[in-house]
Amino acid sequence: MSKFEIHDLGEPKSYLGIQVNYNPNECTLKLHQTQYAQTILDRFRMSHSKPTATPLVTTKTDPKNPKLNSDIPYRSIVVSLMYLANGTHPDLTFAVNYLSHFQRKPTEEHYRMLKQILRYLNGTVNKGLVYHGKTNVMIVHTDADFASDVTDCKSTSGIVIHLYGDLIVWSSHKQDCTTLSTTEAEYVAISEGLCDAKFVYGLTNDLLENVPRPITLFEDNVSAICLAKKQENKKTKHFDVKYHFICSEVECKFVTLKYTPSVNQLADILTKPLGKMAFQKFRDALVTNIRNEKRLRMAKY
């Protein structure tokens, strides 16, 4: 058997641009990208810009808006922000994902919206994720914005998954199919969120310990919840078969669907631009100021 010399470098301090701070006394793990975020602001000369309260105000744009000069690094900004949004800034996910759709032919208006994200980042560079690991239950939030894309009328799904009481998965993306109602769009989002939850559930059981079943999935559309419990009607027969696996998962008690009002729907921040009050409410429930770990709990876990 071959032998190799190794060195113990101690506790990790950073990994692929993500800074790691572990506090054994408080049993907390902090992940943030403060240095990376500051590098982005310095690189694109936005470190002295005036911060904004939200990263995106609206998705409505003027089709007659002039095209952006090719010398402006629109794509470079999007790619830089995307790594930040996927790493430790779920509050940027929707805005960055939306503007990434226009990398091929951006307009001056898209560039102004992109600079607003940088201005928002300038005021939130210290935001990050804090893990406490207090409970082993899994909580899922799913939401959808019906026909939000004006070009193809497809809906946007938002998914948030908490495990051990902390955020581990978030997603914002345009749905593959074109739905015909709000109920169908929400139902598709539930299906996508359940797929992600099953993957996390299996991985956690293989590596750590068994997660209690059933897991809880919060949804703000009553019709979609009733449909998942097989209370269907003639208007829902056109739904794709692949989305109806939700019913079997409910039957085998893998998941329990519960209603939550839209004002408490965490995934709402991942589906559309929100006003200042609503956005900051959901943001503070997902990310934490590394210098102040007080967080707002949106769901009764």
Image: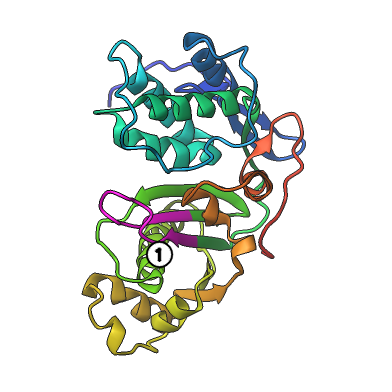
Q: Quadrant of the C terminus?
A: bottom right
Q: From what the image shows, is residue 142 above or below residue 172?
A: below
Image position of 108 with respect to 195: above or below: above
Q: Nearer the viewer, residue 278 or 285?
A: 278
Stretch of the chain drawn in magenta: 142-159
Is residue 253 on the magenta stretch? no
- Magenta-drawn stretch contains 149: yes
Is 176 or 18 nearer to us in this picture? 176
Q: Is residue 4 left or right of residue 211?
A: left
Judged from this view, the residue extending furthest toward the front is: 64
Given residues 266 and 247, the one toward you in this image is 266
Where residue 68 sits, quadrant-wise, is top left
**The N terminus appears in which quarter of the rendering?**
top left
**Which of the colour schemes (rainbow, by chain, secondary structure, one colour) is used?**
rainbow
Residue 35's x, y, as percent? Answer: 57, 17
Q: Amino acid at mark 1?
A: Leu
